Amino acid sequence: MKKILSVLLAASVCASGFAGFAGCGGGEEEPLASMKSELARTYAERSIQLNDSVREKYWQDAVLFMYHYYPNFTTDASGDMSTAFAWPYTETVAASWRIATLSDGAKGQVSDYYKNLLDGFEYYRAFRTDYQVYCASRGTEIGMAAGDTYYDDNVWISREFLNAYEIFGDEKYLQSSEGVAKFVWSGWANDELGGIYWCEQKKNSRNTCSNAPAALLFARLYEATDDAEWLERAKRVYQWTYDTLRDPSDNVYWDNISNEGNIQTWKFTYNTGSMIAAGVKLYEITQDQSYLEQAKASAAGAFGYWFKDREGFDYKVIDSVNPWFNVLLFDAWVELYKYDPENVLVYIEAYEANLNHAYSMLSDGLMPSDWVNGWSKDEAGNPVISKANVLDMAANAENFGTLAYFYEYVKE
């Protein structure tokens, strides 16, 4: 059945005019031919398909420009250019990175686009000399961006440079990753409360989103550089986040703490996911069992918090409508799987069911950000795509790429 599904999907992709697959015609080798798992291949095909839709609908290669919304609104000087901010732009890079991890053929196919996206970061680079820093808003010239700089935005950008270094082996990406990470560390509050601030210009809160992924980034930089200072920073940031922003009732993480010590108790999948992934990585580096046990506890807490029984569904339904938030939790579960396969497989299979349901609502080459309810509908019941943001659409591609990676390289 899985093989039939793969064949049918490939056929439907070719019939729809999707040119991303070299194997749809012309006799060229199909980029996923080396993949061993038929199920992984099916999910990889979906990832590539969704990624190519993002490239087609949002990307302007000649000027390295990414729209924020589809349909795009840009007519004249009074129109809305719908320019992607740094955060969603970074996710378009992450989606291509994930595809590059799936096979040599997939890497070869996506490399040019991937490298152009990496070059496009420079339009977000701030005009300053103290740190390599990226602004939330895109500038009109390379290296001339201005405006607010967020520590979490720069964590994600540093991460993508590090990912690119691991894919391509080019030292310039590692140097950029370290350079940006130094800026992130400069956001550590040297006061009694501690933690990394959220925004450089508005130092009024220390957020899980600027600390948890920084702990993971710093740990990975230690692995890449063997610089012990990165490991010490990783452990310090991780411990601060664990001690300050974890809800002890379920091991799920709150959003932020103000300078006055008031905790904002919102909970988002990506914050807990980032701490799980950081815990797994620190366990792998230090062999300190406490990191692994904390990651397991948060993984179970996240599943209980966000996955619920719902009438009409034969699987637990996710209660989070941000695919980017979700992929960071999913990626953390994939990393944790090898240390707790029996429990984590339950989480991943529920996640997979939600993804497959969402894919069944594909429209105009895009998958809805609301995986449960899908697109809004017109009076005739047809899907209405309005202001589909590139963050969600690129994250959908990464989600299927991560699922493919799990079945090809991780699952026993």
Image (cartoon, rainbow, N blue to C red):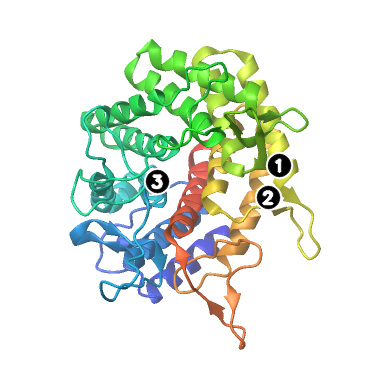
Q: Is residue 177 visible from the viewing direction of this image? A: yes
Image depth: mark 1 or mark 2 in front? 1
- Residue type at numbered disc 1: Phe
| 315 and 175: which is toward the camera | 175
Location of residue 176 by image quarter: top left
Q: Find residue 384 and report its horizontal and vertical position in percent.
A: 53, 77
Q: Secondary structure at mark 3?
A: helix
Kind of residue at badge 3: Ala
Question: In the rendered view, would you say 115 is above or below 217?
Answer: below
Is residue 335 visible to the viewer in this orientation of the structure? no
Residue carrying label 1: 303
Q: Residue furthest front?
A: 260
| Label 1 to label 2: alpha-carbon separation | 9 Å
Relative height, residue 86 to residue 340 (above, below):
below
**Crowdedness near tag 2: few (<14), some (14–19) or many (≥20) residues, C-alpha within 10 Å:** some
Q: Secondary structure at mark 1?
A: helix
Image position, residue 307 (x, y; %): 72, 49
Q: Which amino acid type is shown beneath numbered disc 2?
A: Ala
> Residue 94 has which mark?
3
In the rendered image of this protein, does residue 92 appear above or below residue 338? below
Task: Answer left or right for 129 relative to 9.
Answer: left
Residue 304 in the figure: left or right of residue 46:
right
Say which quadrant the C terminus sits in.
top right
Q: Position of residue 72 (x, y in %)?
A: 36, 71
- Label 3 packing within 10 angstroms: few (<14), some (14-19), many (20+): many
